[in-house]
Image (cartoon, rainbow, N blue to C red):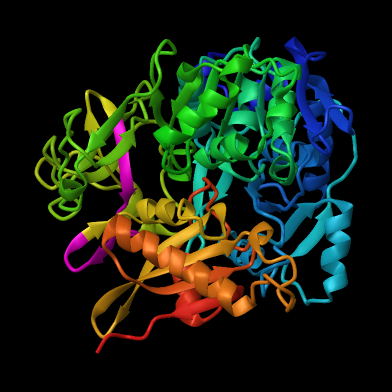
Amino acid sequence: MRPKDMTIVDFLKERATRNKEDLAFRFMGNGELDGPITEWTFSEIYRRSVGVAEDLVERGLAGASVLLAFPPGLDFVKAFFGCLLARARAVPVPLPNPRSKNPLDRILRTAKACDASTALTDQQIAAMVQAMGFEMPIGFRAVTDRIGTDWTGPRAGMDEVAYLQFTSGSTGHPKGVAVRHANAVSNIRVMGEMLRLNSTKPAIVWAPHYHDLCLVGHVLGPIYYGYESTLMSPMEFLLKPVRWLRAMSHYKVANTACPNFGYEYSARRIKGEECEGLDLSHWIVAGNGGEPVLPQTMERFTKKFGPYGFRPQAFMPTYGMAESVLFVAGMKPLSRPPRVLRLSTADLEMHTVRILADDEPGGRTVVSCGRPGSGHRVIAVDPVTLTPSDSDRIGELWVQGPSVPGGYWGLPEESAETFHARLADTKEGPFLRTGDLGFVADGEIYVTGRLKDLIIIAGRNHYPSDIELTVQQSGAPVRLGACVAVSESINGTEELVIIAEVDERRLPADPQSEGPGAESPDAFWASAVKTVQGAVSRAHGLSVRSVVFVEPRSLEKTSSGKPRRRYYKELFLKGDLAVRHAHRSPQPL
């Protein structure tokens, strides 16, 4: 059989034979090198997955959609491959959020969207859901511990849907990208080309396992290329980010990836004395995607960890989304750092690209996301005329290539609109309409924002990511990477709204204290609001009508780690946010 005809399942079976005793997956239970660590070889993951597949077939779930609602760990990995072996559609979902008013709402909406009747999970989660006492339209079942030998069931075809990667969707309308085996294998090859992957380059990730970043790069990738993949819980990283770098040092990791937030968080939170003994000289690729890549973050991270072997050319900003499986662009020479352009802010407000000269002040920096992978094409298109944008104009990024799936599961109209676009002048297509704004320069992709998230006030275009960065750097008590900027229409006028998670570490130690120097709650929140409003006014010339501080870890992101701005705008308008403090300025007369 030629490699181009091999499915994910074929590669899994091949690894179980050719590399059966090689380490495939490692899970660090608490993120510590001396903590509980689970390791499975390629043979073990295959036999455990066969056991899951046998159980699914016996329960009549072959060909059905099966939700995978697991905490971090390797049970998710065996359940995912078990679904693929049984030709059930795997549907990774996040666990119920206890901070949400309706903790099971997202799971139930996803189940309805893909007609799933069963959710696989572990014993603890199954018991917790049962204890809630809700009448459930789906059954939560603990995944089996059965160990199989070899799978002899019918073989999946390349055009068969392997799994559904759900995007955030709106409040009641989640969308599942129907990823076929052919799409996944194509994107894994693109990933390998970009990241220079092979069996000798171990990888590590702390991103959630249900995110496409972890699923494609660190669950599917090892099966294709044969490298060992170390998984960590995102919570263990957040509690102590040096765990990530210590694991990289210990296991001589060559590749990792996370959003810009992860590098910023590490540079800010890891103390100098914690770095003793680190060896990052094996680090070849530091993938950075899912949110805007900031030059100052790369500089800060390099300055702090360069003495321990980290090289600035390791940074590899990437561009992608669930609608393209994962990767779209990211190719760059490993010998140089990413390209950075400084653009005129005033021209950007008019969707025009003008690169500033070295002696021109101000401006906004944008980082190149590299070139598309082989066989893939990215163009910038005017979202109104649906014709290619001029080289000096911002347009919507359209993607073409074998990684792009055919559409969303069970949504033909939205699939046609998003996945089957054609240019108005030449009728060329189909293209994936990404909804992202940007431009292409010297063959490299630059992303400037989201089309539907663009904030237009008084005829000027404002990118919410710029405003969110201003708020996070303002000195206000805002958690890093946990802020969204949206607008609301009041009497026909768009007004700016900031929704941000409060940083609990910045709260007064005893807000009820009346001792000398104690800050009252009213004074604390008034100062926080004033800080946000002042920073946005100075940087963007905008007035902030509403500032809403919400509970920590209550702003979830998309499956690709992007802010769910429209979703939280809906919750704001409904008054359904987990509010810690809200301020609303009076409307001008």
Q: Which residue is more in the foreground, 39 or 57?
A: 39
Residue at point 65%, 9% (across, down): 200
The prevailing secondary structure element of the residues shown in magenta is strand
Kindly tell me whether residue 430 is visible in this rendering: no
Relative placement, left or right, of 13 versus 485 is right
Relative placement, left or right, of 169 versus 418 is right
Q: Which residue is more in the foreground, 580 or 455?
A: 580
Q: Which residue is more in the foreground, 87 or 189?
A: 189
Image location (x, y in percent) of residue 193: 46, 17
Image location (x, y in percent) of residue 335: 42, 10
Which residues lie in the magenta part?
A: 445-460
Residue at point 16%, 29% (across, down): 357
Would you place residue 71 above or below residue 457 in this image? above
Residue 451 colored in magenta in the image = yes
Relative placement, left or right, of 446 versus 384 is right
Split into 4 quadrants, where in the image is the N terminus?
A: top right
